[in-house]
Amino acid sequence: MGDNLSPIIFIFAAIRMETQLLETTINTVTQKIKNLYIESYGCAMNFADSEVVASILLENGYNTTKNEEEADVILINTCSIRENAEQRIRHRLIHLRANKKRNNELVIGILGCMAERLKKNLLEEEKLVDIVAGPDSYRDLPKLLNEVEDGNKSINVILSLEETYAEISPTRLNSNGVTAFVSIMRGCDNMCSFCVVPFTRGRERSRDSESIVKEVKELSDLGYKEVTLLGQNVDSYLWFGGGPKKEFVNLTEEEQTKSVNFAKLLEMVALVDDSMRIRFSTSHPKDISDEVIYTIAKFPNICKYIHLPAQSGNSRILDLMNRNYTREWYIGKVNRIREIIPNCGISCDIISGFCTETEEDHKDTLSLIELSKFDFSYMYNYSERPGTLAARKLEDDVPEVVKGRRLQEIIATQNAVSKLKNKNREGKIFRVLAEGFSKKSNNDLKGRNDENMVVIFPKENYKPGDYVDVLIERSSTTSLIGIVVGKSEKP
Ligand code: SAH
Ligand code: SF4
Ligand code: F3S
C-alpha cells in the first residue's frame, strides 16, 4: 500500500515545493529583511523563549540585531513576578515610545508574563505598545506583525494546554557558545499563594523528551559544553505523549509504558555527550525524588548542584504560601541530598515579610539558612501580585520598612554562611568550565565549578569551553579565585 501511494506523495511534494519556491521569490521581491531587536527580563525561561521567538521570526524575514537604533521591530519579553519588575519595564517602554516619535515606522511589542497579565490594557489604557503577545502565542507573531503593518494594534494572549514549541530550534541570542538553556516544560500547576506565574504561564505541560534530546544533541554538535534544563518545577516533568499534566497513576497503561519522568530525562540527556555538563532549574522541595538525586549522583556530567527554593523557614508561613511542605520536610530533603551527594551545592529563594509573618517566623527563616548552609540565595521582599491567592485572601500586613529590615538580616545571614563555605574551599581543587572573561579583567577567565560557584583564574592559554582544574587560593562571599593546575576533556 505504501508503494502505491508514493507517486502521489511525490507529485504532491513537487507541487508544494514549487509553491514554496514561488512564495520565497515573492517574499524576496516584495519584502525587505527587517531588523528585530529583542530585550528579555525575568527568569531564564523568558530568555529561552526569546530564542524561540527569534527563530520563528527568522523564518519569516526578520534578522536579529543587537542595536536597538537600527531595529524595525522591538520586542520586550517581560516579567511580572514582583511589582518593581513591572515598574522597570514600564519605564523602559516609556523610553522606547520616545524612539517611536523619531521613527514612526518602528513597531514595539510586549511579550511574556506582563503581556499575559495586563492583556489589552497595555494597548488601550496605557497605550504603550503596538503588539501584545502572551507566552503561548509566539507562533502567531508573524501574523500579529502583519496586522500592525496594516495599521492595526494586535493582541494574542490565549494560553494553551499543549504548546511547548517542541520542534522549534531556538536561535541562540547573546550566546557565549559554551552554555545554553533548554526548555523542558511550560506553565505551573502549583498555585503558591504569592505567585503570579500560574496566571501568566498557564497550565503545566511537558515537552516531548525526544525533541529535548535532539536539541541537546544539536548543541553538542555545535560545541556547547553545558545545558541547563528549564522548568518552573522540573521534578514534576512527565512526558507521556502530550497534553496537560497528569499524575503517573492517572496514565493509561500505554502512556505509563512510554512515559519519561525527570530522572529518566536527566539520564537520557546525560548520555548524549559525556563531555557536556547538565544543569537544571528549578526543583520544588515537595517533588524532588530519591530517584532524581541518585541519577544526579550517578552521572559525572550531571552537575552536583540543586536550586531548592524554601521561600520561608516557618511551617505556618509555608502553609499560608501553599508550598505543601513544612520546615521539617525541607530540612529532611536537604539532609537526604547531602547524604546521597555529600558536597552537593544547594541554593535557595527566600521571601521576606510574607502576610502575617512575625519576628519569630522570620527568625525561623534565619535559622533555616544557617542550618541548611545554602551556598547562596536569591532574596526578595514580598510583593503582592493582583489576582493571586494571597492578594485575594490575605492582608499584605508587614510594613515595607519591616520587610526591608528583615531582608537585610536574611542577606547578612546568608552572606556569612556563603563566606564561611567559600573560605573552606580555599586550598581545594575544582574542575571549572571556562565561560568567558571575568568582569574585572581581560587577563582572567570566569567559569563555574560543579556546585555552581563562580571561579576566577588567569587566562594564560585557556579559552571559553575548556575544562580546567583550579586550585583555590582566595575567596569572597560570591566567588573563588585560584590558579590552573590541570586541564581536562571531561566535566
Ligand atoms: N518555580 C520556582 C520559582 C519561580 S519565581 C519555584 O517554585 O521555586 C522565582 C522566585 O521569585 C520565587 O522562588 C520566589 O522566591 C520569588 N517570588 C515569586 N513571587 C513573589 C512575590 N510575589 N514577591 C516576592 N518574591 C516572589
Ligand atoms: Fe510560582 Fe510556586 Fe509555580 Fe514556582 S512552583 S512558579 S513559586 S506557583
Ligand atoms: Fe517572571 Fe514570568 Fe519568569 S513572571 S520570573 S518571567 S515565568
Image: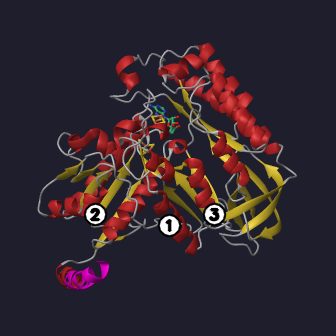
Against 81, is 381 above or below? above
Residue 191 spot, x, y in % from top left: 42, 31
Quadrant where the N terminus lies?
bottom left
Tell me where the magenta segment starts and ends, as one range: 1-16
Q: Residue at x 41, y 16 (%)?
A: 395
Between the residue at mark 3 and the residue at mark 2, the CA separation in whole angstroms equals: 40 Å
Q: Which residue is mark 2?
A: 73
Residue 327 spot, x, y in % from top left: 63, 23
Of label 3 and label 1, which has the lower sequence position? Answer: 1
Decide: few, some or many residues near mark 2? Use Cα within 10 Å; few <14, some 14-19, many ≥20: many
Q: Relative to 218, is 416 on the left or the right?
A: right
Amino acid under disc 3: Leu
Is residue 68 at all visible to an observer of this figure? no
Against 114, is 72 above or below? below
Q: Which residue is mark 3?
A: 271
The residue lying toward the viewer, choosing from 246 and 335, is 246
Q: Which residue is mark 1?
A: 214
Against 166, is 14 above or below? below
From the viewer's perspective, is the residue at label 2 or at label 1 nearer?
1
Q: Relative to 149, is 59 on the left or the right?
A: right
Amino acid under disc 2: Val
Amino acid under disc 1: Lys
Q: Residue at x 65, y 20 (%)?
A: 364
The residue lying toward the viewer, choosing from 139 and 47, is 139
Residue 245 spot, x, y in % from top left: 41, 42
Q: Check disc 3 and report its element: helix, strand or loop.
A: loop
Between the residue at mark 2 and the residue at mark 1, the CA separation in whole angstroms equals: 31 Å
Residue 142 lies in quadrant: bottom left
Q: Are marks 3 and 1 in contact (CB under 8 Å)?
A: no
Of label 2 and label 1, which has the lower sequence position? Answer: 2
Against 11, is 441 above or below? above
Of label 3 and label 2, which has the lower sequence position? Answer: 2
